[in-house]
Every structure is written in structure tokens, then in C-alpha cells.
Image (cartoon, rainbow, N blue to C red):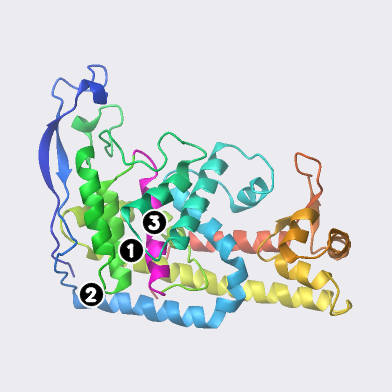
């Protein structure tokens, strides 16, 4: 099964001194082949029947999952975004465990990798929020959310210099692949956004082709992979394929990174089927892991309900415990703001939850505020992440 799609062609360019092309970093021959990206906004897409069936299987499976577990996992949406951002960053060799992200977000300094992944959390969230209309300006906003805290000079701007894949020290003349010249990026992104706006193809296939085209354009000096994967979620959310939960597709991709790279290479040669198949396998893996997460959460909530059944229905213990799904690392002040209950009542509720080992105390914030963690949720999330990065298949 293969597809016919316009392949990338090339133009020969020279690596200029102002672009870093000096004698110490390149051979005497500074010429290189830079990609010419074929426009796809109006390209006729002939979808092989097996690829169309795979896409329909994805749509059906996501719809069934969403109907079954959406209400339960909706409070975990913020955490699912963090799992996806962590896995997406890991593809770029930036690792930060989800618990470290949660601690950092409530005032615990955890290092540069965590800051990078938190930026990816912001980018994925921005992509979902802005998903109704995906334009070049929207994509720049997503990139700005990704890098504004770690690389503010680069954030929200198209690249102005060459980028290349492979052979860092040798520059583009020695690279495996050189994306298009910077001057071609704005037009290529305009074309891509027109493609994203089409309504004449299955959205899952459209999202995976969009991603491959985006990675081929490589419009930014940094953050291309993370923004490109965030845009997949934006398209799936925009068209209602995902509603209640952000599936951690990147967790499936990271376990087959070489296959991911090979699929992008095949796309440049004119075949979009491999990237669609990879995306489908990652989706089915995410659905299996999320279904197990649903069961784990249901069992955890049942234990909590039994443990807290002694409290009156109007006790602050109940809304505080329900809020823990979305906020597994808390302090009394932020919890009071979240549930809209007085600080004194929330402080008492936290004490009761600690006595029953639903909450465990951890080191206070930098300003001395006490904090607690829900270790049950941390365990569930860690189990979820471990399952998600194991080898997967469609069956």
C-alpha cells in the first residue's frame, strides 16, 4: 500500500559566511541541496483503500472511547496534556518526568529540561485553545508559547537562516536533509494552512499529512517537532475527533522513533501512507493505555469514596478530593481558589485527607507554604506513561 503525493525537489544553494559557513565547519565545497516544498493546498489526494480503512478505524475507536470515558477523564485533561508534552519532548531528547512538571508548576525549581517541557505544555494547550482557526499567526502563537520562557529571542518568529538534519558540525553541505531556504518559509506555511482548512478528506489522514509537511518545511530554528505534534492535537480537537481527552500520541511515537524518521523520509519521497500508519498505531496504543488509565482512576475514586463516606455530604472534604484529579500537587491557598471555598475549610479538609493517606506532605514552596501530593495519582500517571511507551500494534 502506497500513495502518490508530490515529492520534494531540490535547488542548489551555497552556505554563506553570514550563515556560519566558515572553513572550520565545512568542506571547501559549500554547495548543498535545499528542499523545494511542493504546494499541497489544492493537491488532489488519492487515498489507498487500506489507508482509508485505517483512518476510519481510528475515528471509530476514538469516538467509542470518548463516549465511554469522557466524563471520568475530563478532569485529567490537564494531566494528559502534560503526559503528551513530556513524551513529545522526549522525541527531541528532552526528558522530564510528569511528577517533576507538577512540582515545578507549584514553585519547585527542577532544572532546564523541566522548563523546556513546561513550554511544550503551554504550546500544546495553546494549540488546543486556538484550534478553531489554524493560521500562520496561530502557529506563531503556539511557537511563542513553547519558547517564550526558555528562548525568547526565537519565540514566535519564522527562521531566517538555514537549518539542517544530520551532520551538525559539517553544516548543510554534509547534512542528511536540508529544509527549504528561509525566504521560502512564509509562502510554504500559507499553503500548509490552506491545506489544513480543507474539508474533503478524513481529518486523521489530513492531520498526519499536515504534520509531515510541517516537519519538511521546518519553519523554526528550534521547536519544530513539538509544535508540529501539537498541531495534530489542534486538528483532531477542531474537527471533534477528540473531545474530552488529549490522547498521548507522542508516547507511542517515542517508542518507535526510527520508524517515525523513516516515515517522514518516505513522505518527502511522495508517500504519505507510512506517516498515517504510524499515527494510527500510536493512537491505538494511546487508546489502550488510556482505557487502562480509566480503570485505574475508577478504582482509585471508589477507594476514596469508601474512605470518605463518614463525612457529611456538605463537607469540604468532598469538593477538595474531587479537585485532586486535576491538581495532584496542591497547597491550601491554591486549592481554596480552585474550589471556591474558604481557606479555613480547605485547610481542615486537607488535614482530614492527609490523615487518611489520600494526601501526603512534601517539601514546602520557596515562600514556605506547605504542600501535599496525591501519590495515588502520581502512581497511576507513571503506570500510564510506562504502558504508553511500550511497543505497540493495531490489535
> Dot 3, how many residues are within 10 Å of its Cα: few (below 14), some (14-19), or many (20+)?
many
Place of residue 350 in the rendered image (x, y in percent of width and height, measured from the top left) = 84, 61
Answer above or below: position of 248 versus 361: below
Which of the 4 quarters of the picture holds residue 42? bottom left
Q: Which mark is residue 60?
A: none
Magenta residues (range): 221-240
Read off the residue under disc 3. 229
At x 41%, y 47%, the residue is: 143
Answer above or below: position of 117 versus 385: above
Earlier in the chain: of badge 1 and badge 3, it is 3
Q: Which mark is residue 200?
A: 2
Place of residue 113 in the rendered image (x, y in percent of width and height, measured from the top left) = 54, 40
Alpha carbon distance from label 1 to label 3? 13 Å
Earlier in the chain: of badge 1 and badge 2, it is 2
Alpha carbon distance from label 2 to label 3? 22 Å
Q: Residue 228: within the magenta? A: yes
Earlier in the chain: of badge 2 and badge 3, it is 2
At x 49%, y 72%, the residue is: 288
Count of labels in the image:
3
Residue 145 visible in the snapshot: yes
**Closer to the camera, 326 or 389?**
326
CB under 8 Å between callouts 1 and 3? no
Read off the residue under disc 1. 278
**In front: label 1 or label 3:** 3
Question: At numbered mark 3, what does the secondary structure look like: helix, strand or loop?
Answer: helix
Q: On the rendered structure, is 231 left or right of 163?
A: right
Residue 263 visible in the snapshot: no
Amino acid at each position: 500500500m502506497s500513495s502518490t503525493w508530490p515529492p520534494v525537489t531540490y535547488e542548489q544553494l551555497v552556505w554563506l559566511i553570514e550563515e556560519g559557513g566558515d572553513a572550520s565547519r565545512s568542506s571547501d565545497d559549500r554547495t548543498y541541496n535545499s528542499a523545494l516544498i511542493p504546494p499541497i493546498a489544492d493537491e488532489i489526494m488519492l487515498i489507498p483503500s487500506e489507508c482509508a480503512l485505517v483512518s476510519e478505524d481510528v475515528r471509530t475507536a476514538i469516538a467509542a472511547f470518548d463516549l465511554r470515558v469522557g466524563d471520568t477523564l475530563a478532569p485529567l485533561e490537564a494531566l494528559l496534556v502534560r503526559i503528551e508534552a513530556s513524551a513529545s519532548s522526549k522525541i527531541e531528547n528532552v526528558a522530564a518526568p510528569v511528577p517533576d512538571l507538577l512540582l515545578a508548576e507549584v514553585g519547585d525549581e527542577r532544572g532546564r529540561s523541566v522548563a523546556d517541557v513546561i513550554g511544550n505544555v503551554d504550546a500544546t494547550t495553546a494549540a488546543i485553545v486556538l484550534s478553531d482557526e489554524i493560521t500562520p499567526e496561530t502557529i506563531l502563537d503556539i511557537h511563542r508559547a513553547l519558547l517564550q520562557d526558555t528562548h525568547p529571542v526565537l519565540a514566535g518568529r519564522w527562521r531566517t537562516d538555514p537549518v539542517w538534519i544530520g551532520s551538525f558540525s559539517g553544516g548543510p553541505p554534509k547534512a542528511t536533509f536540508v529544509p527549504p531556504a528561509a525566504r521560502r518559509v512564509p509562502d510554504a506555511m500559507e499553503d500548509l494552512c490552506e491545506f489544513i482548512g480543507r474539508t474533503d478528506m478524513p481529518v486523521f489522514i489530513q492531520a498526519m499529512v499536515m504534520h509531515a509537511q510541517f516537519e519538511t518545511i521546518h519553519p523554526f530554528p528550534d521547536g519544530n517537532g513539538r509544535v508540529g505534534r501539537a498541531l495534530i492535537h489542534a486538528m483532531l480537537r477542531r474537527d471533534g475527533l477528540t473531545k474530552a481527552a488529549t490522547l498521548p500520541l507522542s508516547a507511542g511515537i517515542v517508542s518507535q522513533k526510527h520508524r517515525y524518521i523513516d516515515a517522514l523520509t518516505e513522505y518527502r519521497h511522495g508517500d504519505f501512507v507510512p506517516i498515517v500508519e504510524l499515527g494510527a498505531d500510536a493512537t491505538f496504543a494511546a487508546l489502550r493505555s488510556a482505557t487502562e488509565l480509566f480503570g485505574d482512576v475508577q478504582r482509585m475514586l471508589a477507594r476514596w469514596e469508601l474512605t470518605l463516606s463518614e463525612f457529611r455530604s456538605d463537607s469540604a472534604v468532598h469538593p477538595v478530593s474531587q479537585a485532586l484529579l486535576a491538581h495532584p500537587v496542591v497547597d491550601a491557598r491554591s486549592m481554596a481558589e480552585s474550589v471556591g471555598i474558604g481557606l479555613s475549610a480547605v485547610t481542615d479538609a486537607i488535614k482530614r485527607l492527609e490523615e487518611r493517606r489520600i494526601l501526603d506532605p512534601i517539601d514546602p514552596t520557596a515562600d514556605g507554604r506547605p504542600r501535599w501530593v496525591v501519590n495515588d495519582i502520581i502512581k497511576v500517571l507513571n503506570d500510564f506513561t510506562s504502558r504508553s511507551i511500550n511497543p505497540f500494534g493495531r490489535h
